[in-house]
């Protein structure tokens, strides 16, 4: 390992021994799950590089940006508007929440029956192993589910600058007004942090950066409609995960390059799995790095994932922000419009999400839906039952999986998933 | 043509050999601590053209013997339909899994439910409870049927239920009454699973736990209809795998 990185990690206050252990597990997991895949697009080499440098080069880049006076803002949710962050020349990073870490420490401050995602965020903080978290000048805690909302009260005592953002729970005029007020307050906070006044030109630039990333991801998603699928669900998920912390321009270019390659594959009828492989739409809770368990089981059981109805997926990326406004007020309104469409399960009622799942099943020609509910995630687990019922009424086979980040249930999950694939074949 | 099916479960391994869809041989052994060695022993001297594996050890078997595999869920559905062609619902309770399977008119799995990581409501639960009460597994069901004053067991968790049983024993309750309550708690859990896949008659009860007369009795009582019980309920999965092997 590069010596510069170790010094950098030390300066960030990481626990080097624990961090080494984390990188080793991460590297091994990536090797076994990602590099073991056959016939991957060559362009994925970029993501292999990103993953190998996930705590190295990318952190060094952030450090260099910080040295040049730029700010880093960390987030746990797709409701934090990237447009506003980019408008102030700051960098938005999605924080690590995809692995169990320092569980004993975490359970001293959070109840055991808290979802693995929240516990993971705390584990990375308490275990001192996340350089993104440590390099952030501001963290944003959004009031989505009760678990996150209440845990931020504890997180506030662990980090220097936690900005709490309230999020509406109903798609009403009042709800939208709340989101708008909170986004304006966030804009003020970002301006204060960076010392930059966000004007029309800056906001337009911020919107363009975020939209370009989304457009690249939309293009990638569209190519997955092909049979045979030109890219595995695991690789597409990785692109959606890296979306949250890579340099946006480089990310956009790299995804577009992969798309060029996939278009050629499709022309030649080439895929990562044979034509006719059962096609799965994954729907439910977000999967942050390195939570690859379920997609890995699915794609090693004879099916291919063709879409993710998830925050780390199409729920998070699907709409563009209208950049036609000519005042800050109008552009902020457009940003609010865009994010208010996100159909997170914290909203009640939330019929748009079901419509989107059905739409994705049709668009990506999926044979069935696997609903991923993270254990103790009340909003998505609650929704999973009516979603399953509604999909089955439409003759869309659905399997509900309720799991966490541990590997103890892999055997049982494999049996259930294989049986589901036998059923839809 | 001879086709074999092997069901490598958590507690037992079953082997069924078919000749032109006629059962010509069945074998069974404990899974032990080295299921592949046991499977090899079981296959000693068995002639077959094709073999298919199911059960927990199917993937290990696939690696060792280059055999195709099928999940227990499909294997039980196929085996059940062979024995009873009109079956629409299968309840399979094995050593560490419980499954409810609904089968459509074409004989295909329409929907299934399976217990997740915990062994509550499975054969393992009954096995440990029998031990706690000092019964052999074979006698457990028959003794439970002799209960006069059934005890309510509220815990589904094996560990908690064990302490519940211990406290009932120390209170001086008749162990047969406790045994009936324990069986009832497994039935309650099975019913929950059956209801999630919708129960349609005829219903077949299979897996090792189907050998237990008290379980059969309580299930029939709760469902209000007779349930089908194959002669050897543990062979249904291996039979299904053998049938699928014969279809290539």
Image (cartoon, coloured by chain):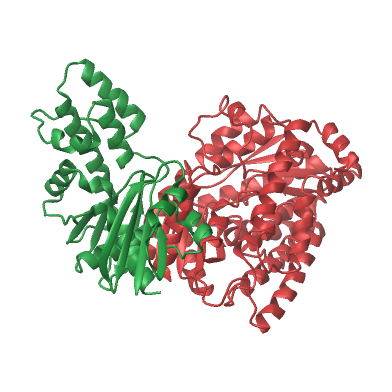
Chain colours: A red, B green
Q: Residue at x 47, y 64 (%)?
A: B67
Give percent across and percent down for residue A177: 57, 50
* Number of marks in picture: 0
Image-based side of B100 in relation to A98, left or right: left
**Quadrant in which the C terminus of chain A is drawn:** bottom left
As drawn, which residue projects farthest toward the left?
B148
Query: Which quadrant would residue A23 be assigned to in this image?
Result: top right
Give percent across and percent down for residue B122: 31, 42
Image-based side of B175 in relation to A175, left or right: left
Query: Which quadrant would residue B197 be assigned to in this image?
Result: bottom left
Give percent across and percent down for residue A380: 47, 50
As drawn, which residue projects farthest toward the bottom?
A267
Nearest the viewer among A183 and A306 is: A306
Nearest the viewer among A2 and A243 is: A2
Give percent across and percent down for residue A86: 78, 53
Q: Residue at x 73, y 30 (%)?
A: A160
Asked whether residue A348 appears in the rendered view, the answer is no
Nearest the viewer among A212 and B194 is: B194
Q: Residue at x 28, y 51 (%)?
A: B207
Vertical comparison of A200 with A269: above or below: above
Image-based side of B213 in relation to A318, left or right: left
Query: Which quadrant would residue B110 be assigned to in this image?
Result: bottom left
Asked whether residue A370 appears in the rendered view, the answer is yes
Nearest the viewer among A103 and B121 is: B121
**Quadrant in which the N terminus of chain A is drawn:** top right
């Amino acid at each position: 390992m590069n010596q510069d990185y170790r010094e950098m990690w030390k300066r960030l206050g990481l626990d080097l021994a624990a961090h080494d252990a984390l990188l080793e597990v991460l590297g091994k997991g990536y090797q076994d799950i990602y590099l073991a895949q056959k016939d991957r697009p060559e362009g994925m080499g970029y993501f292999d590089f990103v993953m190998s440098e996930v705590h190295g080069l990318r952190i060094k880049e952030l450090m260099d940006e910080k040295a040049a006076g730029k700010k880093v803002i960390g987030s746990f949710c797709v409701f934090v508007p990237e447009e506003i962050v980019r408008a102030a020349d700051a960098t938005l990073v999605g924080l690590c929440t995809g692995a169990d870490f320092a569980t004993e420490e975490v359970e001293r401050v959070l109840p055991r029956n808290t979802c693995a995602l929240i516990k993971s965020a705390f584990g990375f903080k308490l275990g001192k192993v996340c350089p993104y978290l440590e390099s952030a000048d501001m963290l944003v805690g959004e009031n989505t589910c009760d678990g996150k909302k209440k845990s931020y009260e504890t997180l506030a005592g662990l980090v220097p600058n936690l900005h709490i953002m309230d999020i509406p729970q109903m798609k009403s005029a009042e709800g939208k007004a709340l989101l708008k007020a909170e986004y304006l307050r966030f804009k003020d906070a970002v301006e204060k942090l960076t010392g930059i006044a966000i004007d029309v030109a800056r906001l337009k630039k911020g919107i363009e950066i975020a939209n370009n990333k989304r457009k690249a991801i939309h293009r990638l998603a569209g190519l997955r409609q092909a049979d045979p699928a030109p890219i595995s669900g695991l690789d597409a998920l990785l692109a959606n995960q890296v979306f949250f912390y890579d340099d946006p321009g480089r990310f956009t270019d790299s995804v577009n390059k992969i798309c060029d390659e996939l278009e050629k594959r499709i022309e030649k009828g080439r895929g990562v799995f044979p034509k006719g492989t059962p096609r799965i739409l994954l729907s439910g809770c977000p999967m942050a790095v390195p939570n690859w368990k379920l997609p890995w089981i699915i794609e090693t059981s004879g099916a291919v994932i063709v879409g993710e109805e998830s925050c780390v997926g199409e729920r998070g990326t699907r709409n563009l922000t209208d950049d036609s406004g000519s005042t800050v007020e109008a552009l902020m309104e457009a940003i609010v419009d865009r994010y208010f469409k996100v159909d997170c399960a914290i909203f009640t009622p939330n019929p748009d999400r079901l419509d989107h799942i059905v739409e994705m099943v049709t668009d990506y020609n999926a044979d069935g839906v696997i609903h991923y509910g993270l254990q103790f995630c009340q909003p998505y687990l609650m929704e999973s039952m009516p979603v399953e019922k509604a999909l089955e009424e439409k003759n869309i086979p659905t399997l509900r999986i309720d799991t966490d980040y541990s590997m103890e249930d892999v055997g049982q999950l494999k049996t259930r998933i294989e049986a589901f694939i036998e059923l839809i074949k | 043509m001879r086709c074999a099916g092997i069901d490598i479960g958590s507690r037992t391994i079953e082997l069924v050999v078919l000749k032109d869809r006629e059962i010509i041989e069945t074998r069974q052994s404990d899974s032990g601590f080295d299921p592949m060695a046991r499977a090899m022993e079981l296959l000693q001297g068995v002639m077959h053209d094709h073999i298919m594996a199911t059960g927990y050890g199917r993937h290990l078997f696939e690696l060792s013997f280059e055999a195709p595999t099928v999940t227990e869920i499909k294997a039980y559905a196929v085996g059940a339909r062979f024995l009873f062609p009109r079956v629409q619902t299968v309840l399979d309770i094995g050593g560490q899994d419980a499954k409810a399977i609904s089968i459509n008119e074409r004989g295909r799995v329409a929907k299934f439910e399976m217990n997740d990581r915990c062994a509550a409501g499975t054969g393992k639960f009954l096995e440990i409870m029998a031990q706690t009460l000092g019964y052999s597994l074979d006698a457990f069901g028959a003794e439970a049927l002799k209960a006069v004053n059934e005890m309510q067991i509220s815990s589904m968790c094996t560990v908690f239920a064990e302490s519940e049983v211990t406290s009932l024993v120390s209170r001086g309750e008749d162990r047969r009454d406790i045994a009936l309550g324990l069986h009832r708690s497994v039935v309650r859990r099975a019913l929950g699973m059956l209801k999630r896949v919708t129960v349609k008659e005829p219903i077949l009860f299979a897996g090792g736990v189907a050998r237990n007369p008290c379980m059969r009795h309580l299930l029939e009582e709760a469902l209000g209809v007779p349930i089908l019980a194959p002669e050897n309920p543990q062979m249904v999965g291996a039979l299904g795998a053998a049938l699928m092997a014969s279809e290539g």
